[in-house]
Amino acid sequence: MKPMLMRITALLLALLLSPSLVPAAGFGWQGWGPRVGISSEPDQILGGAHFDFGEFAPRVRFQPSAEIGFGDDVTSLTANAMVSYYFPVDASVTPYAGGQVTVAFYDFKSNCEGFGRKYFGRNERDCDSETEIGPMAVGGIEMPLSGGSRFLAELNLGFSDTPDIRVIAGWTF
């Protein structure tokens, strides 16, 4: 990762986790839920969970997540710190947009000839794993379901050696 991108990512992460930015009202445990999806580069099937920590500013929510991915000759683990703005609309579907810092761990021990060689220039002597940190743009919709749960559909666009595109569906309980 380039030094400037690392500095920007570290600054964003520090701001996201800064306790001075978190007012008492509206911020705190709101729920959690499973999420499933697909990604491109690497081409994978994803499964994981997200955690809703509520709004730390009006209509701005902190919702971190983690996924495991399988496919494209690599296993991936990603951790995401997402912050999104939920647009005020007069409808049952609420659109949102924001960004996230993603930490992606790639394990290509099982097949170094695949994703590891293609994207990281790995060969058999140095075929092990790789960790990348980078920003992603996030956009999606959320809608209430019966019983107080919510459904979400989300699109993520990566800007570094994290997945290029992810399409995810999830439920929050």
Image: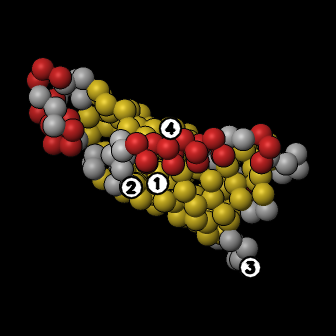
Name the amino acid, label 1: Met
Write down the residue under mark 1: 136
Q: Is residue 149 above or below residue 125?
A: below
Q: Is residue 63 above or below residue 132?
A: below
Mark 4 or 1: the one toward you: 1
- Cα–Cα span, label 1 and label 3: 28 Å
Mark 3 crowd level (few <14, some 14–19, many ≥20, 10 Å Cα): few
**Label 1: element kind:** strand
Write down the residue under mark 4: 79
Taking the view exactly as shown, the residue that stands out farthest to the bottom is: 90
Write down the residue under mark 3: 90
Q: How many marks?
A: 4
- Tell me which numbered mark, 1 or 3, is placed earlier along the sequence: 3
Mark 4 crowd level (few <14, some 14–19, many ≥20, 10 Å Cα): many
- Cα–Cα span, label 4 and label 2: 16 Å
In percent of width and height, residue 99 lies at 54, 56
Q: Depth check: 147 or 39 in front? A: 39
Q: Would residue 32 be visible to someone looking at this image?
A: no
